[in-house]
């Protein structure tokens, strides 16, 4: 998979190379290119923004630098991701969908956003997805892009050492993950649930499923109602 990032803060994305994606780059699974949008400006001040037509607060990112970047980077056929609080919510299933793409190009807005024509033009050459990390506002798209990258890259075939841990984790089956324990069996007066020491794999699997359903019903009832588990298990309302 090839990843391109168009940002006015390239240094902001440096940690990507340190974390798990860094290993994927070394192994050749990933190619990562971070670009400074100002490289495609031509004025003395390297201007990337201007006032909004129609008035209003804040500044809007200008279309021309993005247009030149699209041409030079040949974005045709890629999936262009625009991180914005007004996008579709980022979920595990969207991460899985994006992990099937060959190339993701992230457009990272600052200020009040990017001129709409940038997205409209990109849509004539590529798949465009506007994605929100959640219902809150960040200063810009960089942090959102890092989160999306990490969630997507770890799903690439060959990325995770232990494929089973992917299947069992939160959200993969529509439920939050059950609580986990390790040694020692007793710690500061707190005991590991007996069933986990029993060696009875069937009972352990049942217990974990019950715990996952209960945890989901308390913390994220919206997920439970959407999942298959809601039809298979009696849901006890949280008290
Ligand atoms: N940029 C600013 N806020 C954001 C959010 N919540 N999700 C994605 N990109 C953003």
Image (cartoon, rainbow, N blue to C red):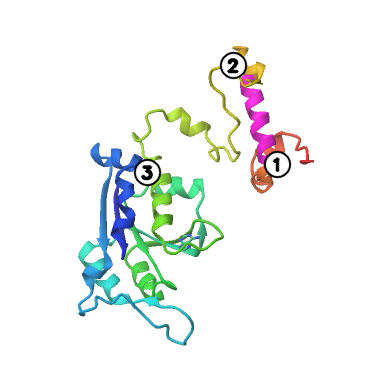
In the rendered structure, which disc, 1 or 3, sits on the residue that comes first in sequence? Answer: 3
Q: Secondary structure at mark 1?
A: helix
When the figure is inspected, residue 199 is found, relative to residue 146, above or below; the finding is above
x 37%, y 43%: residue: 153
Judged from this view, the residue extending furthest toward the front is 188
Q: Which residue in the protein does label 1 denote?
A: 218
- Indicate the quadrant where residue 181 lies: top right
Would residue 155 be found to the left or right of residue 71 on screen? right
Q: Per the image, is 105 magenta?
A: no
Q: Position of residue 32 (x, y in %)?
A: 27, 50
When the figure is inspected, residue 7 is found, relative to residue 68, above or below; the finding is above
In the rendered structure, which disc, 2 or 1, sits on the residue that comes first in sequence? Answer: 2
Q: Position of residue 46 (x, y in %)?
A: 24, 75
Q: Secondary structure at mark 3?
A: helix
Q: For the residues marked 1 and 3, what is the alpha-carbon distance in whole angstroms?
A: 30 Å
Report the disc number at residue 153: 3
Report the disc number at residue 72: none
User: Do we see residue 9 in this rendering?
Assistant: yes
x 39%, y 83%: residue: 51
In the rendered structure, which disc, 3 or 2, sits on the residue that comes first in sequence? Answer: 3
Q: Which residue in the protein does label 2 denote?
A: 185
Residues 234 and 53: in front is 53
Q: Position of residue 39 (x, y in %)?
A: 21, 68
| Residues packed near mark 2 inside 10 Å, few (<14), some (14 to 19) or many (20 plus) | some
Numbered range of the magenta stretch = 204-216
When the figure is inspected, residue 149 is found, relative to residue 157, above or below; the finding is below
Q: Per the image, is 208 magenta?
A: yes
């Amino acid at each position: 998979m090839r990843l391109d990032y168009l940002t006015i803060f390239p240094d902001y994305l440096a940690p990507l190379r340190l974390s798990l994606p860094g290993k994927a780059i070394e192994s050749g699974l990933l190619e990562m290119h971070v670009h400074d949008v100002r490289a495609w400006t031509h004025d003395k001040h390297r201007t990337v923004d201007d006032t909004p037509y129609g008035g209003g607060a804040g500044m809007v990112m200008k279309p021309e630098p993005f247009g030149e970047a699209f041409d030079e980077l040949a974005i045709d056929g890629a999936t262009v991701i625009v991180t914005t609080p007004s996008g579709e919510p980022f979920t595990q299933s969207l991460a899985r969908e994006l992990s099937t793409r060959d190339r993701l190009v992230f457009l990272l807005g600052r200020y009040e956003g990017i001129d709409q024509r940038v997205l409209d033009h990109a849509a004539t050459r590529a798949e465009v997805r506007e994605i929100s990390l959640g219902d809150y506002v960040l200063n810009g798209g960089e942090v959102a892009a890092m989160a999306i990258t990490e969630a997507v890259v770890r799903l690439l075939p060959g990325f995770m050492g232990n494929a089973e841990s992917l299947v069992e984790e939160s959200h993969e089956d529509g439920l939050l993950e059950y609580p986990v324990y390790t040694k020692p069996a007793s710690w500061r007066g707190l005991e590991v649930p007996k069933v986990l020491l029993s060696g009875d794999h069937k009972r352990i699997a049942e217990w974990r499923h019950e715990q996952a359903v209960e945890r989901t019903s308390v913390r994220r009832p919206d997920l439970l109602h959407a999942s298959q588990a809601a039809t298979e298990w009696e849901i006890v309302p949280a008290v």
